Amino acid sequence: MIHPLHRENHLIERIGWLRAAVLGANDGIISTSSLVIGVAAASSSSSEALVAGVAGLVAGAMAMAAGEYVSVSSQADTEEADLARERKELAEHPEAELAELTSIYVARGVEPALARQVAEQMTAKDAFAAHARDELGLAEHVVARPIQAASTSALTFSIGASLPLVITYLSPGSQIAPLVSAGSLVFLAGLGALGASVGGASILKPTIRVTFWGAFAMGATAAIGALVGHAV
């Protein structure tokens, strides 16, 4: 029986935006909650903690967007340089490039004669695409997208940062630190589980990892805030 052709939706196709989304939301929760807790440990004023948190949200979202854009743009520049070099080599040395493509398939376990035939057919169809994919490893789902990464990180950072801010706003001054800590750890655990689920990975390990480092960051800033508050 001949099975009809179907398109498989692989989870790796999500890696571009998923990495930026998880990084942004995770950073938003941890940095903002840590900032709020640090200020709350140094001062009993809820307004000071809230203002610090809002400032952290705005500054953090802008920093995430700029950082992701610059970083991923550098990756994109490198990819473009490699692709331009590949175009030039294909135009100037087509036989050498065909031999190189053949050797790649041989190294992957294809018989030399068949590898040559495959390389010739791939070259006839789209030589540049074949070399970009098989020589440089640049497939559609891994190509750098600076604007997508920047906008995703800024948006998810803002969403993540808004969660501890809501708790701060609703909490009495004396209870800000413990309530923000507890709430943020719950949010981080949920984020770790969600990110793992969307990425098709095991849920337990990512959840423990992100919760542990979140607790460590909040504990450190609370201790520093308390020390500074007593010193001042």
Image (cartoon, rainbow, N blue to C red):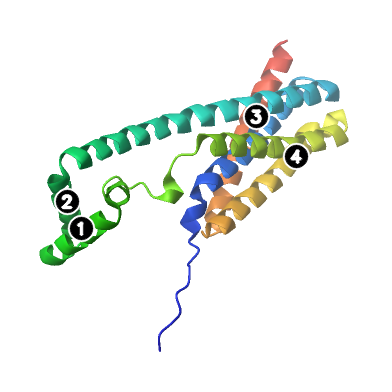
Q: Amino acid at mark 3?
A: Ala
Q: Secondary structure at mark 3?
A: helix
Residue at position x 59%, y 43% in the image:
21
Of label 4 and label 2, which has the lower sequence position? 2
Where, by quadrant of the figure, is residue 229 drawn? Answer: top right
- In percent of width and height, residue 217 lies at 60, 33
- In percent of width and height, residue 223 lies at 65, 26
State left or right for residue 209 relative to residue 58. left
Q: Which residue is mark 2?
A: 98
Q: Secondary structure at mark 2?
A: helix
**Toward the viewer: 50 or 84?**
84
- In percent of width and height, residue 125 lies at 29, 57
Mark on residue 119? 1
Q: Secondary structure at mark 1?
A: helix
Q: Quadrant of the C terminus?
A: top right
Mark 3 Cα shell of 10 Å, populated few (<14), some (14-19), many (≥20): many
Q: Nearer the viewer, mark 1 or mark 3?
A: 1
Labelled pair 2, 1 in contact (Cβ < 8 Å): yes
Mark 2 Cα shell of 10 Å, populated few (<14), some (14-19), many (≥20): some
Q: Nearer the viewer, mark 2 or mark 3?
A: 2
Of label 2 and label 3, which has the lower sequence position? 3
Kindly report the distance in space between the C-alpha atoms of the residues bearing marks 2 and 1: 6 Å
State left or right for residue 145 relative to residue 113. right
Q: Nearer the viewer, mark 4 or mark 2?
A: 2
Of label 1 and label 3, which has the lower sequence position? 3
